[in-house]
Image (cartoon, rainbow, N blue to C red):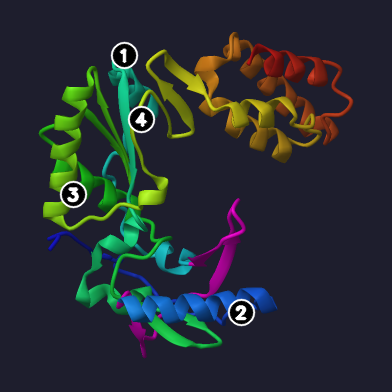
Amino acid sequence: MRDVEHSIELVRDYRVHHQAPYRLSIPEGTELKRHLEELLRLGFIKPSNSPWGAPVLFARKADEYFRLCIDYRGLNRYTVKNCYPMPHSDELFDCLAGNRFFTKIDLRSGCYQIRAAAADQPKTAFRSRFGHYEFMVMPFGLTNAPATFQKAMNDIFRVILEHYILVYLDGILVYSRTFAEHLRHLRDVLDRLRRHGFYAKLSKCCFAQHKVDFLRHCVSDHGLHMDDAKITAIAEWAAPTFTKQLRSFLGVTNYYSNFIRGYASFMDFVTISSAYFRRHHSLTTLPCTVPCLCRMMVSL
């Protein structure tokens, strides 16, 4: 039984937050009812009479799956922030040079594998037209959930971190130079997960491969590469005409800046564009906008 639990510490002048349920479409309502039945069956939630109450909404994922989301912004506003450091992907990838075998392990609904502290479970309460419930496990959407989960993973693998394993939240990468070595490493990692009561989702795991996807990058025995799908998405991105669109575009390209030659010069253009927008409220009349973005796309 894992011995970690998630606590929610509130600031001194907090106010109990409760909000009316959001309106859901018919398919979303059907999916919500199914989710609630499943969460109750698994023992992840229970009926609540808490004064707290966050609304529910859904995020549609790429495989047409509806992901249940709780809007905890009201609770997060009054939560004391946990400043536990998160790993930087660039530093993680530096450990992979010279390795030939890779295994990717995705933990099943990672947050749900950590208990919510009994005293704090009423704070996780959420409202829907099907009733009022609270979580007995750590739900997605809490401001400190990533910090709690990363700390739990680091504690489990501390002795072997960056020797033959990388961990970023519920994503685990095991790497080795030889197949025999990889089997030993993998056995150790799986044994640690078993002893601490964490479970993986087999359909999302890849074992002893020469090439795997990890943290939106392609990791192989030939080095680190961008995901082909991301290259295509960036190359086909329509030229932004407003700063919000520009920020969205740069949010993607900045993550892959190591693969874009002359990225610093492109960022100089961003500074100019921002100043131009403040005067003209549009980027469409800025002559260098489209050519500059095209050069960035071609450089990929």
Which stretch appears magenta?
43-71
Q: Earlier in the sequence, mark 2 or mark 1?
A: 2
Any magenta on residue 227?
no
Dot 3: what SS?
helix
Frontmost residue, 96 versus 234: 96
Residue linked to disc 2: 29
Q: Which residue is mark 1?
A: 97
Q: Which residue is mark 4?
A: 88
Quadrant of image for the C terminus: top right
Query: Which residue is pictured at 47% across the width and 28% down the height?
Result: 217
Residue 45 seen by the camera: no
Of labels 2 and 3, earlier in sequence is 2
- The residue drawn where x is 32% and y is 63% is 112
**Residue occupied by mark 3:** 193
Residue closer to the observer: 266 or 90: 90
Q: Is residue 196 above or below residue 186?
A: below
User: Closer to the N terminus: mark 4 or mark 2?
Assistant: 2
- How packed is label 1: few (under 14 Cα within 10 Å), some, or many (20 or more)? some
Q: Nearer the viewer, mark 2 or mark 3?
A: 3
**N-terminal-most mark, 3 or 4:** 4
